[in-house]
Image: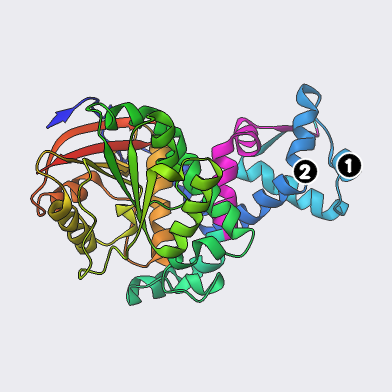
Amino acid sequence: MEVTEKKQRRLFEDDNKPAVVAVRDAQYIAFAPYIFQASILLRDKGILSYVDNTRTNGCTIEEVTANVNMPYYGVRILMEAGLGIGLLVRRDGKYFLSKTGHVFINHPMARINTDFMRDVCYDGAKDLEASIMQGKPVGLRHLGPWDTIYQGLSILPEPAKTSWFAFDHYYSDQAFPEILPLVFERNPKKILDIGANTGKWATACLNYNSEVQMGLVDLQIQLDVAKKNLEAAGLADRATFHPHNILDNSLKLPEGYDVMFMSQFLDCFADREIVGILKKCYEALPENGSVFINETFWDCQRFDGSAFSLQMSSLYFTTMANGNSQMYDSQVYIKLIGETGFKIVRQVDNIGLSHTILELKK
């Protein structure tokens, strides 16, 4: 197997945290719901932005109250909470934005992750235990009546819909420029996009290569959105739409495609379902074809923070998405691939923000 970039270090092996830090971190866990809600109010009520605008001069609680739509009492308890949370610092009675506070309000990843947790996941988080025990997304009841979130993506209530797609596209879209040369390395003529969603990857391929033909596989409700987007981009004439429930083993994937591509798709399924999907790919893929899998493996991350975000995102899959999938440890994933008849011929880590590309062949 070709691995073009090694992981820089092993994650989560050491436990050398000082006891005082361990005690503090335990309190962060205990008060996590209030930490989250207070941080959002500090952001959305403009308190952090006002403090940020004072730069090195700092500001008082009274000055903030005069410039935001909130009573003095509310501003005071939130700003004091912001000190403990780490969003603010105080010197000589004046408040200043901390480095964490600056990232929290200015970095797009922090905003997108926060909105996703608030609008999609927060209400359903209390159903984590029930979701684990029942093997289904019990928390999804807060958004709609579907068995899985994928059945309702195009009709999610706002602001959940906007936050879900912003979260999904932020990570995958940034990886596409690095992935396209890998996929088109041997000049494929036909690519099957499995789990096409809104057609973002298909659009990227059609714009990247003027001759490639794209097949899009997904539930009909998602293909309707993808088709509309490709038509608007003037690219639909090189696209074929294949309505398909990937978990229905009586249905076969369309044949005749040089490459099959799945971006952040297989992580939406349980272990045995991943094996079944890959076996369907194996049956439909020509002998010299390739399957490219774009995934975010938590153990392949460069930084603890990235791995942590992925591990927490697994809980979204449990409570809100389908109740049985996750952001995988790559070693679990590779063992599953070993059951399908495929071999991994290439692994490229550290693509985009957090992605890994696996290329499979028969």
Look at the image and tell me whether residue 311 can be seen: yes
Residue 202, image x, y percentages: 40, 42
Are the two marked residues, 2 and 1, in contact with CB atoms closer than 8 angstroms?
yes
The image quadrant that residue 117 belongs to is bottom right
Question: What's drawn in magenta, residue-wise?
Answer: 93-119
Q: What residue type is labelled 2?
A: Gly
**Image spot of residue 185 (x, y percent):** 25, 26
Q: In this view, does 238 lie above or below 252?
A: above
Give the left or right position of residue 223, taking residue 86 as reference. left
Give the label on residue 67, or none.
1
Mark toward the start of the polypeptide (2 vs 1): 2
Q: Is mark 1 on a helix, strand or loop?
A: loop
Q: Residue reaching furthest top?
A: 56
Residue 46: assigned label: 2
Say which mark, if any, is on residue 113. none
Residue 61 screen position, x and y as percent: 84, 42
The C terminus - image quarter:
top left
Magenta part, dominant SS? helix
